[in-house]
Image (spheres, rainbow, N blue to C red):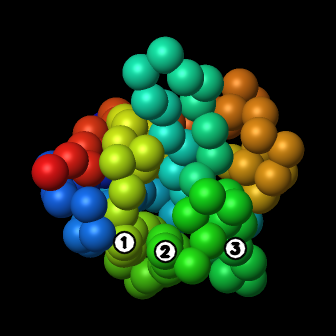
Amino acid sequence: QPLLVESGGGLVQPGGSLRLSCSTPGFRLNGYAIGWFRQAPGKEREGVSAITLSEGSTYYADSVKGRFTISRDNAANTVYLQMNSLKPEDTAVYYCAAAGGLGPWIVGKYQVIPHWGQGTQVTVSS
Protein backbone atom coordinates (compact mmCIF):
# COMPACT_ATOMS: atom_id res chain seq x y z
CA GLN A 1 0.00 0.00 0.00
CA PRO A 2 1.50 3.35 -1.03
CA LEU A 3 2.22 5.82 1.72
CA LEU A 4 1.02 8.86 -0.25
CA VAL A 5 -1.90 8.84 -2.68
CA GLU A 6 -2.51 11.86 -4.89
CA SER A 7 -5.59 13.03 -6.72
CA GLY A 8 -6.61 16.11 -8.66
CA GLY A 9 -4.74 17.78 -11.48
CA GLY A 10 -5.78 18.04 -15.10
CA LEU A 11 -6.12 20.63 -17.84
CA VAL A 12 -7.28 24.16 -17.06
CA GLN A 13 -7.26 27.50 -18.85
CA PRO A 14 -5.08 30.36 -17.63
CA GLY A 15 -6.74 32.06 -14.68
CA GLY A 16 -8.54 28.88 -13.69
CA SER A 17 -8.35 26.79 -10.53
CA LEU A 18 -7.52 23.24 -9.53
CA ARG A 19 -7.27 21.41 -6.23
CA LEU A 20 -4.76 18.68 -5.48
CA SER A 21 -5.18 16.21 -2.64
CA CYS A 22 -2.63 14.00 -0.93
CA SER A 23 -3.80 11.35 1.49
CA THR A 24 -1.98 8.87 3.67
CA PRO A 25 -4.39 5.93 3.90
CA GLY A 26 -3.75 3.82 6.94
CA PHE A 27 -0.85 5.95 8.18
CA ARG A 28 -0.68 8.78 10.68
CA LEU A 29 2.33 10.93 9.92
CA ASN A 30 2.39 12.89 13.14
CA GLY A 31 5.35 15.23 13.23
CA TYR A 32 5.69 15.21 9.44
CA ALA A 33 5.31 17.92 6.86
CA ILE A 34 3.44 17.14 3.66
CA GLY A 35 3.46 19.21 0.52
CA TRP A 36 4.26 19.34 -3.16
CA PHE A 37 7.20 19.65 -5.45
CA ARG A 38 6.73 20.15 -9.18
CA GLN A 39 8.81 19.40 -12.22
CA ALA A 40 8.37 20.86 -15.68
CA PRO A 41 10.03 19.28 -18.74
CA GLY A 42 13.74 20.05 -18.81
CA LYS A 43 13.68 21.77 -15.42
CA GLU A 44 14.79 20.89 -11.93
CA ARG A 45 12.22 19.70 -9.41
CA GLU A 46 11.19 22.66 -7.25
CA GLY A 47 9.34 23.03 -3.98
CA VAL A 48 5.87 24.54 -4.23
CA SER A 49 4.23 24.44 -0.82
CA ALA A 50 4.15 22.38 2.36
CA ILE A 51 2.45 22.26 5.75
CA THR A 52 3.38 20.68 9.07
CA LEU A 53 0.67 18.31 10.25
CA SER A 54 1.00 19.19 13.93
CA GLU A 55 1.44 22.99 14.06
CA GLY A 56 0.06 23.90 10.65
CA SER A 57 3.15 25.94 9.75
CA THR A 58 3.34 26.57 6.03
CA TYR A 59 5.83 27.22 3.25
CA TYR A 60 5.09 28.74 -0.16
CA ALA A 61 7.44 29.34 -3.05
CA ASP A 62 7.56 33.00 -4.06
CA SER A 63 6.12 32.10 -7.45
CA VAL A 64 2.86 30.82 -5.94
CA LYS A 65 2.35 33.13 -2.94
CA GLY A 66 -1.08 34.73 -3.01
CA ARG A 67 -2.39 32.20 -5.55
CA PHE A 68 -1.99 28.80 -3.88
CA THR A 69 -3.30 27.78 -0.45
CA ILE A 70 -2.31 24.63 1.40
CA SER A 71 -4.45 23.14 4.15
CA ARG A 72 -4.77 19.93 6.14
CA ASP A 73 -7.51 17.72 7.48
CA ASN A 74 -5.78 15.58 10.06
CA ALA A 75 -8.91 13.54 10.78
CA ALA A 76 -9.00 12.52 7.11
CA ASN A 77 -5.21 12.14 6.81
CA THR A 78 -5.36 14.48 3.83
CA VAL A 79 -3.57 17.63 2.70
CA TYR A 80 -5.01 19.91 0.02
CA LEU A 81 -3.41 22.39 -2.35
CA GLN A 82 -5.89 24.90 -3.75
CA MET A 83 -4.40 26.49 -6.85
CA ASN A 84 -6.05 29.67 -8.14
CA SER A 85 -5.15 32.14 -10.89
CA LEU A 86 -3.17 29.44 -12.63
CA LYS A 87 -0.58 30.46 -15.21
CA PRO A 88 0.98 28.53 -18.10
CA GLU A 89 4.24 28.47 -16.15
CA ASP A 90 2.51 26.41 -13.46
CA THR A 91 2.36 23.53 -15.93
CA ALA A 92 4.28 20.59 -14.48
CA VAL A 93 3.99 17.20 -12.85
CA TYR A 94 3.15 17.81 -9.22
CA TYR A 95 4.52 15.32 -6.69
CA CYS A 96 3.18 14.98 -3.17
CA ALA A 97 5.97 14.48 -0.64
CA ALA A 98 6.37 13.82 3.08
CA ALA A 99 9.35 14.71 5.23
CA GLY A 100 10.21 15.33 8.87
CA GLY A 101 9.73 19.11 8.56
CA LEU A 102 9.65 22.03 6.14
CA GLY A 103 13.41 21.99 5.64
CA PRO A 104 13.54 20.30 2.21
CA TRP A 105 11.11 22.85 0.81
CA ILE A 106 12.80 25.85 2.40
CA VAL A 107 16.29 24.93 1.18
CA GLY A 108 15.08 23.37 -2.06
CA LYS A 109 16.60 19.91 -1.52
CA TYR A 110 14.11 17.43 -2.90
CA GLN A 111 16.81 14.76 -2.81
CA VAL A 112 16.33 14.24 0.94
CA ILE A 113 12.58 13.65 0.75
CA PRO A 114 11.94 10.07 1.99
CA HIS A 115 8.37 9.61 0.75
CA TRP A 116 6.80 10.49 -2.61
CA GLY A 117 3.41 10.23 -4.26
CA GLN A 118 2.93 8.98 -7.80
CA GLY A 119 2.72 12.46 -9.35
CA THR A 120 -0.14 14.17 -11.17
CA GLN A 121 -0.04 16.30 -14.31
CA VAL A 122 -1.22 19.91 -14.16
CA THR A 123 -1.50 21.63 -17.53
CA VAL A 124 -2.45 25.30 -17.86
CA SER A 125 -3.20 26.15 -21.45
CA SER A 126 -5.79 27.89 -23.58
Q: How crowded is mark 1: few (under 14 residues within 10 Å), some or many (20 or more)?
A: some
- In contact (CB < 8 Å): disc 1 and disc 2: yes
Give the CA separation, mark 1 to mark 3.
Answer: 20 Å
**What is the CA distance from the residue labelled 1 to the residue labelled 2?**
6 Å
Q: Which residue occupies 56% across, 37% down?
A: 115
Q: Which image quarter: residue 50?
A: bottom right
Structural crowding at the residue carrying mark 2, measured as other residues with C-alpha within 10 Å and reported as few (<14), some (14–19) or many (≥20): some
Whether residue 99 is situated above or below residue 80 in the rendered picture: above
- Residue type at mark 1 is Ser
Instruction: Specify which label sits upstream in the sequence, 3 or 2.
Output: 3
Query: Tags 3 and 2 in contact by the CB under 8 Å rule?
Result: no
User: Where does label 1 land, which residue?
Assistant: 85
Residue 100 in the image: state x and y as whole percent.
75, 52
Q: What residue is shown at x 56% (from left), y 64% (from top)?
A: 64
- Label count reads 3
Residue wearing tag 3: 58
Image location of residue 126, percent across then percent down = 14, 51
